[in-house]
Amino acid sequence: MPNPRTIAIAGSAAGSAALLAVPAAAAPGTMDVTVTIPRLTVAEYHRPYVAIWVEKDGAKAKTVALWYDHDMKGGEGTKWLRDIRQWWRAAGRAMRLPADGITGATRAPGTHRLSFSRAQLGAAAPGSYTLVIEAAREVGGRELLRIPFTWPAAAGAGGKVAGKTELGTISLAFR
Amino acid sequence: MKKHILGFAATAAFAILAAVPAEAHRQWLLPSATVLSGDDVWVTVDAAVSNDLFYFEHFPLRLDDVKAWAPDGSEGKIENAATGRYRSSFDVHLTQKGTWRIASVAEMLTGSYTLDGKRERLPRGTTAANLAEKLPAGATDVQTAEASNRNEIFVTVGAPTTTVFKPTGKGIELVPVTHPNDLYAGESATFQFLLDGKPAAGLPVTVIPGGIRYRDQLNQIDLTTDAEGKVAVTWPEPGMYWLNVTTPRGPRGAAGEDAAPARRASYVTTLEVLAP
């Protein structure tokens, strides 16, 4: 699949031989997010509900991933979505669920890699963004982490934050 | 116990069962949640009159006047209503997305009349409609004033909406500047209050956080509505808050009676402030 960033440059600078020569590797079009869900030793463990979204000053929050019990009968799983409380305020309460390409099943403890295109992140405009990840666990706690990033991004590793309770290390990389 | 109840009724003149907030007692509706998600959503509400917030330790709130309004303005159903010794409880099936209003609204007449040379108070439960039958034969010099009491809560499924805030023009009503189901600790919220449909300037507003039983201080926030009837509250911490607005009481006569009946209105709501 062609790199969207490269397409944008080629399109706006049509006819400029110099810009067309910029190698694709210098203009990442994909963000990889590595999410670690910690293994917890508790009497009653349920996988956390997790929301991942992108914030930009003056723009509506854009949800990119939502892990919950979306397949319970009677939509029972949606009852607890408001416990992902900052996401619920920022985006969730106005969303129609399940959302295509966003809704997913809850994930087990361990490391999970997700990839988002610049378009999926809603990061078409160059500038500063924040990736926010919030986890809320039934009969457990809740944690929210924020990782700033800018677009255009440099290829390679991006921001990294470590959770303390409900989330492990979350890191970004661009390619 | 009976003696105590009678004594209370006599001194407070308007017994709490009439849903008039008497001094030193607080009435409230406490929802199981105010911000809700899901496809089949219910809310359970406790209703009581108590000293401490929000503990049911004194009287149940009577549910006779409690109604629910759906986001589209239609009337909802009060289900599974029960009244116990200390509290009432009921459910509302929130079958529409948006903001619901659950309210107990009472309109009554207060006042007095003269019978056989003695000044008597109008009995509890007098309204404009039943004044004639409540007055004994031979009553003269009847003075009345309207009293409006509103005790209401708001709960929201999904995104907050504002249709249920359309004022009725009766008593004290809340108009959101900040939506009452969008409150977070550390943030400021602004509400406008109307009295009979017009901005209620200069009214005292009392805000008290719940959990009184387990602390020494009330932590009461005292505010006054501005010329537009607005107040701004900054929430110190998450939790349920009791908010009360009351028209000031007129001066009392020598006999302890109101010097002259005046328009009286009170407003109570319970607000949930979430953690950021």
Image (cartoon, coloured by chain):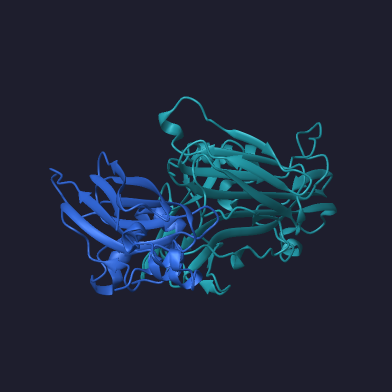
Chain colours: A blue, B cyan
On screen, B55 above or below B213?
A: below
View extreme (front): residue: A17
Q: Quadrant of the C terminus of chain B?
A: top left
User: Does B273 appear above or below B208?
Assistant: below
Q: Nearer the viewer, residue B161 or B265?
A: B161
Q: In the rendering, at what x and y percent does residue B222 appear?
A: 64, 34
Residue B116's spot in the image, x, y percent? 82, 47
Residue A67 in sight from this viewpoint: no
Instruction: Report the residue at 55% width, 53% height from top.
Output: B180
Say above or below: B87 vs B257: below
- In this rendered view, identify the residue nearer to me: A59 or A3: A3
Q: How far across and how far down the image is residue B140, in percent?
A: 85, 53
Residue at horizontal 75%, vertical 34%?
B256
Report if residue B132 is visible in the image: yes
Quarter of image, res B255: top right
Nearer to me, B90 or A71: A71
Would you say B114 lies left or right of B124 here? right
Would you say B165 lies left or right of B94 here?
A: right
- Left or right: residue B208 compared with residue B248: left
